[in-house]
């Protein structure tokens, strides 16, 4: 389970937001009980005239594809590459190995399933931006005549239904998959192979999700239900993708929203594992995003109150603002659990009806009120938390390089 962009500050922010203010002291999250160590996420950096002429720079800040490749294959690669090396060598992934051993396999994501992290478990391409080629490989990468991923749940309809190719129809007509496109369809599905595509690109944020769209927990529960029927076991990758997307925008409300969705999915996995006692659950992040600090500008506090009762994330509010006629202060006032100050109203009322400017303005209000600070709109090189539970979890204790985690996962699925 990968919380994309999830650093310790994101976990802490969600823990504080979720706890009962009347209870003194820390109220641990379910996943906190399984903290075993940390992951160093440095990738290869490189200056290249050509792909075959790279000068490696150690301690580079990783991107999602390089880090997910490390988890998926136990091997290093350059940023931007998906489960292959700079020379074009295809790295075997843990999901592919599980499929070759006759185990159930699946990927679940709140991004498009062709995005860097889920793609790194299924596809092999030199650039994470090759979304059409990645979608093709979801269908064409096969073991024993069947697509390597038995259950595929997330966003990405745009990449699977294209002018040049309709992969959805191919999955259904030629590979025998059941297509599900909403929550009711997902809950009713009782088939061995599932393709669930619930949005053109990424799913709505957890707080913004309409009732027709499944949560990450819903998708995780269904994937486990299907894959656990396999007597040989299964491998499932679950990604809370949009923790990262929110942190790239320095959006504290979005981070907490997506942490809630991811934590709910973690609970589903841990509940399943607790029943049989024979399932290894590993939870970590591919990297930290945003350099989030709880406290800013000299304030010795972090205040979750402005986020408690917030009815939508800034991403949703921006869509409403751009599509509507209300000023931005009116849009925020309709969703916020607090009264806007005169200065906030005046500043927001002046924002042009343009997505980026509106998003930044909303985030600044919520960051200021919560005392949330950020050092970057990109990734950072700090270590990320590592949690593990179940058989073999002791092997994950301590500090590991990210490719070591991948090697341990390879061992876990091997006979």
Image (spheres, grey):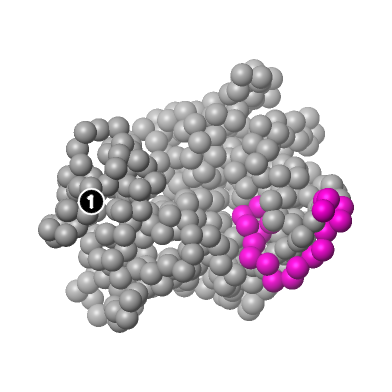
Q: Position of residue 313 (x, y in %)?
A: 32, 49
**Closer to us: 293 or 323:** 323
Give the residue number, with chain letter if any, for mark 1.
348
| Relative to 173, 15 lies left or right | left
Instruction: Check disc 1 and report its element: helix, strand or loop.
Output: helix
Q: Position of residue 269 (x, y in %)?
A: 50, 55
Indicate whether residue 63 is drawn in magenta. yes
Q: Position of residue 116 (x, y in %)?
A: 62, 47
Q: Position of residue 71 (x, y in %)?
A: 68, 59
- Which residue shows up at 55% across the image and 44% down it? 108
**Closer to us: 388 or 369:** 369
- Which residue shows up at 56% across the image and 67% down it? 380
- Which residue shows up at 76% across the image and 45% down it? 126
| Relative to 126, 194 lies left or right | left
State the quadrant of the C terminus.
bottom right
Quarter of the image for residue 152 reads top right
- Which residue shows up at 54% across the image and 26% down it? 179
Q: What stretch is highlighted in magenta?
A: 49-67
| Relative to 320, 175 lies left or right | right
């Amino acid at each position: 389970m990968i919380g994309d962009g999830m650093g310790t500050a994101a976990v802490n922010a969600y823990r504080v937001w979720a706890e009962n203010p009347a209870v003194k002291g820390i109220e641990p999250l379910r996943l906190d009980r399984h903290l075993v160590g940390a992951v160093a996420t440095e990738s290869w950096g490189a200056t290249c005239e050509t792909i075959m002429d790279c000068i490696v720079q150690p301690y580079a800040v990783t991107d999602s594809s390089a880090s997910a490749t490390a988890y998926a294959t136990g091997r290093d690669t350059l940023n931007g590459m998906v489960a292959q090396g700079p020379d074009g060598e295809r790295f075997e992934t843990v999901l592919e190995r599980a499929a070759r051993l006759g185990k159930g396999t699946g990927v679940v994501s709140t991004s498009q399933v062709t995005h860097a992290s889920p793609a790194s478990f299924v596809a092999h391409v030199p650039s994470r931006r090759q979304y059409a080629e990645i979608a093709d490989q979801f269908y064409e990468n096969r073991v024993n005549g069947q697509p390597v991923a038995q259950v595929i749940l997330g966003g990405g309809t745009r990449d699977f239904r294209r002018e040049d190719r309709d992969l959805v129809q191919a999955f259904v007509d030629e590979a025998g998959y059941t297509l599900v496109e909403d929550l009711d369809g997902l809950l009713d599905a009782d088939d061995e192979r599932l393709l669930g595509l619930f949005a053109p690109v990424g799913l709505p944020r957890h707080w913004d999700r309409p009732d027709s769209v499944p949560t990450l927990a819903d998708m995780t529960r269904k994937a486990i239900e299907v894959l656990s029927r396999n007597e040989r076991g299964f491998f499932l990758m679950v990604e809370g993708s949009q923790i990262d997307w929110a942190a790239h925008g320095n959006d504290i409300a979005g981070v907490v929203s997506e942490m809630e969705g991811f934590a709910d999915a973690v609970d589903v996995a841990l509940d399943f594992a607790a029943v049989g006692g024979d399932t290894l659950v590993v939870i970590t992040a591919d990297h930290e995003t945003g350099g989030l600090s709880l406290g800013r500008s000299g304030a010795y506090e972090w205040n979750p109150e402005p986020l408690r009762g917030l009815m939508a994330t800034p991403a949703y509010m921006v869509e409403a603002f751009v599509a509507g006629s209300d000023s931005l202060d009116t849009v925020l006032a309709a969703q916020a659990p607090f009264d806007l100050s005169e200065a906030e109203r005046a500043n927001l009322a002046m924002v042009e009806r343009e997505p980026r400017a509106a998003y930044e303005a909303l985030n600044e209000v919520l960051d200021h009120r919560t005392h949330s600070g950020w050092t970057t709109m990109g990734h950072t090189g700090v270590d990320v938390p590592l949690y593990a539970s179940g058989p073999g979890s002791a092997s994950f204790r301590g500090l590991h390089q990210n490719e070591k985690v991948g090697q341990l996962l390879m061992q876990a699925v091997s006979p």
